[in-house]
Image: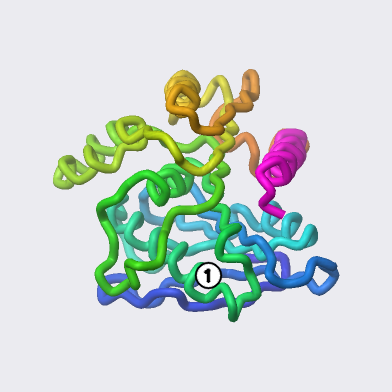
Amino acid sequence: MFNFSIEERIYKVTEEYGALKMYIFTNETSITQPPRPAILFFHGAGFSNNKQNPSQFQYHANHFSSLGYMTICVEYRPSTIEGLFSPIKCLYHAKSAVRWVRDNACTLGIDPNKIVVAGASAGGYLSLCCAMVDQFNDGSDDLTISCVPNAMVVFNGGVDSQLLISLFPDIAHDLSQASPMQLVKNNLPPSIFFHGTLDKNISHDSVRDFVDQMILYGNKSSLISFDGLGHGFFNFGVHDNIPFKSTIKETANFLKENMII
């Protein structure tokens, strides 16, 4: 699954899904000394079975690991269970992951005040929800530990849960309370969005409107559009890696500007 050296850690055990893991990238060549900033990567591919892929961001993670970040690819749903996975249950797990990293900052050698969440599509939606949705917290977590990241990097991410309600009508009410588009407020973490103008899964216009709202409320937020590209344009090995390299560069600039290094 992974092409680089990683350490597997269990961050949560659930009765329904069993052990959920984090894949921590280890880079001995990094010259940055602890405490390091951390980036948690949440993969995309919807909330459906046979698409669980925590290694999606392994090339991004390996790159930022070489720059001195602690980088972690997060498993927020298992690959061994068939069917659809509730976005709300996945949100519980995503929040638990952020809390686990912050709670174990000393052991991991990271700065608990420099934790970044980065996600694609469904993972981008979860990244935003960690910062914006107050509900849906696992009672077994230490809720005194914040799940709000210090910065957000979103790759063709969902910003409106209305897109999910048709897939999950039984939890329509919960999803209506977990829609970033409806929860924009001030004092949110800085954010950067990468989105293709021809994305057929999540419209570019919806993300542009969301970023405009973020700015209107005084948040630091920006959208970098990729003309003529669709969903998943940023993945390693796609489009001769030109968008991959561009998002790497822009993410590094964004993190530097916001002192997450």
Determine the residue located farthest toward the bottom in the rendered image.
107
Q: Quadrant of the N terminus?
A: bottom right
Would residue 178 be visible to someone looking at this image? yes
Residue located 66% across and 44% down the image: 258
Residue located 62% across and 61% down the image: 38
Say above or below: 226 vs 168.
Answer: above
Q: Quadrant of residue 183?
A: top left
Task: Report the number of discs.
Answer: 1
Q: Is residue 40 left or right of residue 14?
A: right
Where does the image place residue 174, in percent across and percent down from the top left? 19, 46
At label 1, the amino acid type is Met
Query: SS for tag 1?
Result: strand
Q: Is residue 159 left or right of residue 118?
A: left
Where does the image place residue 158, in percent across and percent down from the top left? 42, 36
Where does the image place residue 167, in percent across and percent down from the top left? 25, 40
Q: Quadrant of residue 122?
A: top left
Q: What range is drawn magenta here?
A: 242-261
Closer to the camera in the image, 100 or 166: 100
Q: Quadrant of residue 109?
A: bottom right
Closer to the camera in the image, 216 or 118: 216
Most prominent secondary structure in the magenta stretch?
helix
Residue located 46% across and 57% down the image: 52
Where does the image place residue 114, in percent across and percent down from the top left? 60, 58
Would residue 237 be visible to someone looking at this image? no
- Residue marked by disc 1: 22
Magenta stretch contains residue 253: yes
Q: Quadrant of the C terminus?
A: bottom right
Say above or below: 3 vs 158.
Answer: below
Residue located 84% across and 68% down the image: 31
Q: Is residue 188 left or right of residue 226?
A: left
Closer to the camera in the image, 241 or 117: 117
Q: What is the crowding at mark 1: few (fewer than 14 residues within 10 Å), some, or many (at least 20)?
A: many
